[in-house]
Image (cartoon, rainbow, N blue to C red):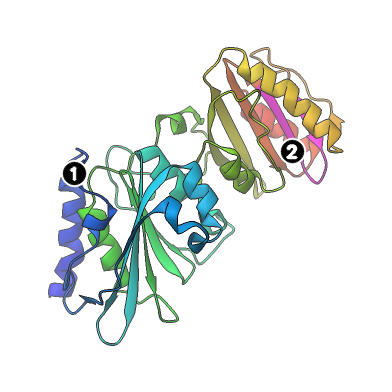
Amino acid sequence: MTKILLPLFLICLIFSASPARSEDKNALDYLPPDNFISGWEATGNEVFSHVGELGYLLGDDVDLLTEFNAIWYASETYSDFEKRLVIEIYEFDNVAGAYGYYQLANVNYIPEPTTPGVEVVRYGLPPQPQFDTIRTVGTSFLEGWKDRFYFRVRSEDSELPDQFLNVAIFLLGSLPGNAIPPDIIGILPRNDLVIGTERYVRGPVGLEILLDSVRGDIFGVNERTWEAAAGEYRLGGGEYYLLVGVKYDENGAADSAVESMQEHFQNDGWQTVIVPAMSSGAHPRAFQKDFCMAFWSHDNKLWLVWDVSSQEKLLDALHQQDR
């Protein structure tokens, strides 16, 4: 009976958590104590460090963590004398950083209709219940985010036991605040958006992860500040494409970025594709190489349609975003 009630009780904790930030607590304070779930004890292998001091120990993640302003890292190993689990908590300087890292750190495992076997657990945190808060990453670990914290629950054995989900729910319930994405995610059109594929990007490291084949900060012009939201869109016939919306702080920056991007892709061997103007009066710059894409500026934002299979499908995607 206890094992059945525990997840339900912890889910209640999620909904009753105060939205106020606990300024006097850090990542270390949220590592669970002994027997937080009956039988699991801390082994004493606790680690607490500034992210900048861990460097290469964080592997390839260190650059993305730095870009999203991760501050503290805390971890502890727990054992029930048969299995061992490791809980890692990253603390960022704000909610947007934790959300952005969560959405980009394991981007290849984000579930899509064509990617079976990835479980997404949604707990309906207000006010935007459509956003994921816990998910499995293959059979390697569970991860989640809430407020300014990102966490992982991973096994030192071959696979994740089913009860590890209870551990993740416990963490989610104990962390402060809510899982509310940054405001810029709201610029993405909702029609045909694949819920759960939203991304937040605010620098060249995340941009390279998002666009894969692009290197460097193609959205930046003369150090102008920008942030971006991205999401996958259904195009029909089993095809999807990526839409990126980039918001700039300075007037005219989006127009300048379009000119700079046109030069970049022309110099990189992309072939120009002729497409019609949009109803807003914007004139997309379209190119084709391994796939088709187009970008344009409107209302001090830059929009990019990326990874479309053909010129015909590109026209369909532009029409879809011109509604």
Q: Amino acid at mark 2?
A: Lys
Residue pictured at 16% horizontal, 76% vertical: 38
Residue pictured at 60% horizontal, 45% vertical: 210
* Chain-order first, disc 1 or disc 2: 1
- Helix, strand or loop at label 1? It is loop
Residue beneath disc 2: 313
What crowding class fits label 1: few (fewer than 14 Cα within 10 Å), some (14-19), or many (20 or more)? few
* In magenta stretch: residue 291: yes
Left or right of 197 on screen, residue 23: left
* In magenta stretch: residue 263: no
What crowding class fits label 2: few (fewer than 14 Cα within 10 Å), some (14-19), or many (20 or more)? some
Residue contact at pointers 1 and 2, CB within 8 angstroms: no
Estimate the x, y position of residue 7 in percent, counting from the top left: 21, 64
Q: How many labels, in total?
A: 2
Left or right of 120 on screen, residue 47: left
Residue pictured at 39% horizontal, 64% vertical: 142
Main SS of the magenta segment?
strand
Q: Quadrant of residue 312?
A: top right
Estimate the x, y position of residue 18 in percent, counting from the top left: 16, 42
- The label number, if any, that marks residue 73 in the structure image: none
Residue numbers of the magenta segment? 285-296
Q: Amino acid at mark 1?
A: Asp
Residue beneath disc 1: 24
- Helix, strand or loop at label 2? It is helix
Q: Is residue 292 above or below residue 225?
A: below
Question: In the depicted view, which residue is nearer to us: 312 or 262?
Answer: 262
Q: Is residue 40 above or below residue 115?
A: below
Q: Is residue 43 above or below residue 137?
A: below
Which residue is the extreme one toward the left? Answer: 1
Q: Give the Cα distance between marks 1 and 2.
A: 52 Å
- Quadrant for the N terminus in the image: bottom left
